[in-house]
Amino acid sequence: MALDSLLARVWKELGVGVRSDGAASHLPVLATVGVEGGAEARSVVLREVRPEDGIAAVHTDNLSEKVRELERNARASLHVWDPKLRLQTRLRGRMFVETGAAVAWLWDLVPDGSRSSYGVTPVPGSPLAASDSYERSSDPSRFAVLSMRIDEIDAVHLSGDYHRRACFRRADDWRGEWLAP
């Protein structure tokens, strides 16, 4: 496998994740630096990938803890493990939180059934008396887009006797280099 083929495969699989909720890349793990300084990780839904710009985006409630974490430290990672392809992909970069008028047009594209995820009361992460003692409502003012400007892609392909690992950096025009797995 050539470096450019591996990079093309990574971008292709990320694109599949945006379009198909059955794809491994549909639910990457977002890792951030927690408010207290520790690592935080949670699954998110991949909503957009733009290889030409090196961008990946997810949506969230703007009152969620991950938004607070990213406001303090914008560095983040997205991790995808595809067991069928035996491909691990780690995206590293800076997340930009976009809300309000900048993302209002995207709100119109959010399916009705998903809109109630943006407006939960009390806010996400709040203690509850019981597992179902919260209200769901559709509140476009709570909708946020987290857009990652990808600076680095680390891809590991576990294949037969020889595992292959490569790192692609924006600063190097995504040329890539092989790394020991």
Image: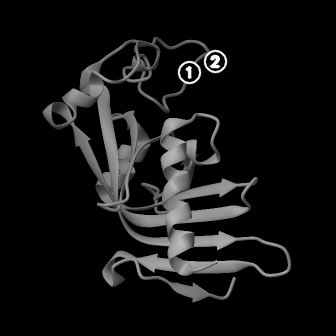
Q: x, y percentage for residue 132? A: 60, 13
How many C-alpha atoms fall within 10 Å of the one at disc 2: few (<14), some, or many (≥20)? few
| Residue found at the very far right of the displayed protein | 161
Which one is closest to the eye, mark 1 or mark 2? 2
Mark 1, secondary structure of its residue: loop
The residue positioned 16% from the left and 37% from the top of the image is 102
Asked if 48 appears above or below 71 in the picture, the reply is above
Please say if the residues under marks 1 and 2 sit with CB atoms less than 8 Å apart. Answer: yes
The residue positioned 50% from the left and 14% from the top of the image is 134
Q: Is residue 37 visible?
A: yes
Q: Which residue is mark 1?
A: 128
Q: Position of 158 compared to 143: left or right?
A: right
Q: Which residue is mark 2?
A: 131
Q: Give the camera-side residue of 31 and 110.
A: 110
The residue positioned 28% from the left and 47% from the top of the image is 97
Mark 2, secondary structure of its residue: loop
Image label count = 2
Q: Give the camera-side residue of 49 and 126.
A: 49
Task: Tell me how the rendering is colored.
Answer: one colour
Question: Hey, which quadrant is residue 48 in on the image?
Answer: top left
| Residue found at the very far left of the displayed protein | 101
Q: In the rendered structure, find residue 34 and report the number of the disc placed on it.
A: none
Question: Hey, which quadrant is residue 121 in on the image?
Answer: top left
* 3D distance between C-alphas at marks 1 and 2: 7 Å
Q: x, y percentage for residue 71? A: 29, 53
Q: Amino acid at mark 2?
A: Ser
Q: Position of 161 compared to 47: left or right?
A: right
Q: Amino acid at mark 1?
A: Leu
Quadrant in which the N terminus appears: bottom right
Q: x, y percentage for residue 166? A: 57, 80
Q: Is residue 154 visible?
A: no
Question: Hey, which quadrant is residue 163 in on the image?
Answer: bottom right
